[in-house]
């Protein structure tokens, strides 16, 4: 074997080792990045599940507080009315889906119960002790005198001397709560202070216990299934062998819920993260190998060209000429693309303005009515004011003049909204009062809704809701969505447009209608996609696409889904924070 061949073989082996090391590094980095993203998604899902559980349990606590002030509670404390109370408790338990409702005297003994027998002693339970101290008590465990898992709320009942004379206990059955969210995409479970699984959306994990020697869970009976855990990049990974409905390798996240004395935990499957990391590592390895192969071929070609340089000079010249022509063609293509992008941006701006003017055209009759009505009222009030002045009644004249002023302000507000809506502008992102934008949008479509017999359910918030955006473009988005909702309800027997604002980490506006719903939610934001009839004056299929682009420019998002009553469009907007202003 010649020295040249040995050198090339050594270079190839070194290159392959470098490619393997680079691929491993990319895989590790991509895997940790994917785990970070999974952790954010998992924590969001866990927070949502936790809020849902707390909200479901809280209503039973409110029920206990309500029943504690019932007149029957005072009679039960005096040893009377047990039969009537049991009938009431049974009716309340049936209607509220409570496992049991009962009343205990100040000694902690059950006097009346919806389902369990009277006489049971609950004086040693923590929730009854706390109720005996005059506070709302809560706890969990196996329901006494029943045998099901339950969460208890005990509300103290006070006598005329303002001393505790008993307590109303409401037991919320966990089976009914779990049925509402069993089988979710994420494996979520809630453990108590002893580490026992008390609530979960996976029935096979109920009452599993945290082992004393470390993380994981073991069943209450039988041998413990395969389990192992390790940490990577600050993430805790569980390796499970717990059945086909739980992931084999899962990211374990924890959230404390001191308000109900439980700890929320979620298991997020890391298989997608590994697949993504594997794909990125494979791509890097393929690119490196392709580059190495090209480099090797180029080197070999150079050797060959060096030996045959004299014969190939003419061919190189022809290739250089061809490359120059290609380069010139590429420059021309870049110029054409820039011109096309400029034309596209201008066309999009014109489409936005056309969409707004189209909406104004639809509402022209309602606008005329909205302006004509206050004008007629102003004329009538002015004539009445003159008559009152002639009759020597300046107070009544002043009242009519005040009404004229109110009508003028109303007309000014309508004209201001129309002028702002119709103006073609692209204002910078700033602080916008979402509440005011929604009020203006509802005013603009109110007359059209009234003419088609549709009612609008919208209760403006009593305070400003500051978000990131532009007032005009946000108004266009909401007018477009509300107009589409009215179009969808044209042939509906019931026409109700609901607008609701939900504040949180992000501000959400839900616009729901009672129409037939969206037939293909995945395509509804595509340009030129429309459910309206072909050839109609409206329905170009650009309104939702433009609205979607506007919300993305603000860092927001629009989603659509169908519910049993119709379609629901949800607009998610980033709230305005002081750091952004700075």
Image (cartoon, grey):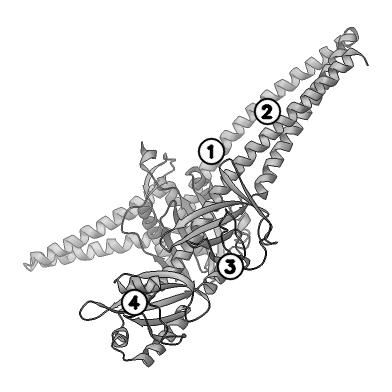
Front tag of 4 and 2:
4
Front tag of 1 and 4:
4
Query: Disc 3 marks which residue?
Result: 206
Give the residue at x 62% y 65%: 219
Question: CA–CA distance between discs 4 and 2?
Answer: 74 Å
Give the x, y percent position of residue 80. Answer: 31, 91
Question: CA–CA distance between discs 1 and 4?
Answer: 62 Å
Q: State whether residue 304 appears in this view.
A: no
Q: Quadrant of residue 21?
A: top right
Q: State whether residue 48 appears in this view.
A: yes
Q: For numbered disc 3, what is the local secondary structure?
A: loop
Give the residue at x 78% y 29%: 289
Query: Disc 2 marks which residue?
Result: 333
Query: Disc 4 marks which residue?
Result: 66
Q: Nearer the viewer, residue 116 or 65?
A: 116
Question: CA–CA distance between discs 1 and 3?
Answer: 60 Å
Q: Nearer the viewer, residue 118 or 99?
A: 118
Residue 363 vertical placement versus 10 (above, below):
below
């Amino acid at each position: 074997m010649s020295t040249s061949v040995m050198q090339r073989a050594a270079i190839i082996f070194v290159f392959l080792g470098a490619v393997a090391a680079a691929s491993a590094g990319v895989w590790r980095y991509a895997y940790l990045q994917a785990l970070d993203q999974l952790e954010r998604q998992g924590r969001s899902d866990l927070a949502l599940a936790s809020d849902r559980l707390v909200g479901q349990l809280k209503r039973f606590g409110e029920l206990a507080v309500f029943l504690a002030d019932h007149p029957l509670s005072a009679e039960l404390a005096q040893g009377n009315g047990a039969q009537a109370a049991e009938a009431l408790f049974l009716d309340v338990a049936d209607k509220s889906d409570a496992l049991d409702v009962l009343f205990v005297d100040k000694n902690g003994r059950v006097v009346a119960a919806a389902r369990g027998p009277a006489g049971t002693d609950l004086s040693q339970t923590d929730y009854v002790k706390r109720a005996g101290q005059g506070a709302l008590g809560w706890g969990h465990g196996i329901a006494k005198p029943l045998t099901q898992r339950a969460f208890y709320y005990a509300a103290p009942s006070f006598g005329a001397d303002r001393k505790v004379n008993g307590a109303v206990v409401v037991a919320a059955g966990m089976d009914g709560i779990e049925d509402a969210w069993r089988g979710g995409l994420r494996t979520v479970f809630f453990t108590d202070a002893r580490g026992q699984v008390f609530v979960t959306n996976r029935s096979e994990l109920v009452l599993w216990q945290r082992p004393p020697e470390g993380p994981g869970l073991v069943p209450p009976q039988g041998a413990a299934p395969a389990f192992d855990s390790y940490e990577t990049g600050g993430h805790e990974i569980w390796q499970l062998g717990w059945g086909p409905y739980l992931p084999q390798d899962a990211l374990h996240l924890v959230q404390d819920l001191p308000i109900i004395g439980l700890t929320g935990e979620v298991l997020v499957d890391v298989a997608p993260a590994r697949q993504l990391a594997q794909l990125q590592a494979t791509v890097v390895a393929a690119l490196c190998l392709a580059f190495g192969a090209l480099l090797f071929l180029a080197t070999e070609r150079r050797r060959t060209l060096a030996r045959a340089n004299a014969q190939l000079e003419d061919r190189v010249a022809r290739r250089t000429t061809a490359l120059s022509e290609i380069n010139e063609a590429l420059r021309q293509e870049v110029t054409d693309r820039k011109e096309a992008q400029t034309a596209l941006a201008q066309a999009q701006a014109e489409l936005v303005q056309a969409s707004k003017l189209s909406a104004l055209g639809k509402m022209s009759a309602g606008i005329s009515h909205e302006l004509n009505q206050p004008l007629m009222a102003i004329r009538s009030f002015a004539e009445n004011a003159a008559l009152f002045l002639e009759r020597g009644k300046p107070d009544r004249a002043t009242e009519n003049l005040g009404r004229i002023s109110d009508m003028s302000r109303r007309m000014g507000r309508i004209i201001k909204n129309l002028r702002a809506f119709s103006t073609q502008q692209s204002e910078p992102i700033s602080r916008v009062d979402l509440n005011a934008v929604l009020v203006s949008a509802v005013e603009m479509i109110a007359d059209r809704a009234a003419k088609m017999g549709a009612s609008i359910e919208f209760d403006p918030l009593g305070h400003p809701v500051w978000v990131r955006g532009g007032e005009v473009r946000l108004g266009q988005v909401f007018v477009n969505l509300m107009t589409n909702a009215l179009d969808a309800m044209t042939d509906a027997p019931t026409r109700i447009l609901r607008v609701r604002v939900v504040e949180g980490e992000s501000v959400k506006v839900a616009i729901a209608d009672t129409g037939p719903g969206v037939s293909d939610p995945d395509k509804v934001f595509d340009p030129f996609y429309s459910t309206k009839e072909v050839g109609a004056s409206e329905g170009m299929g650009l309104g939702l696409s433009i609205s979607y682009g506007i919300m993305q420019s603000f860092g927001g998002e629009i989603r659509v889904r169908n519910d049993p009553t119709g379609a629901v469009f949800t607009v998610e907007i980033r709230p305005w924070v002081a750091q952004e202003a700075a």
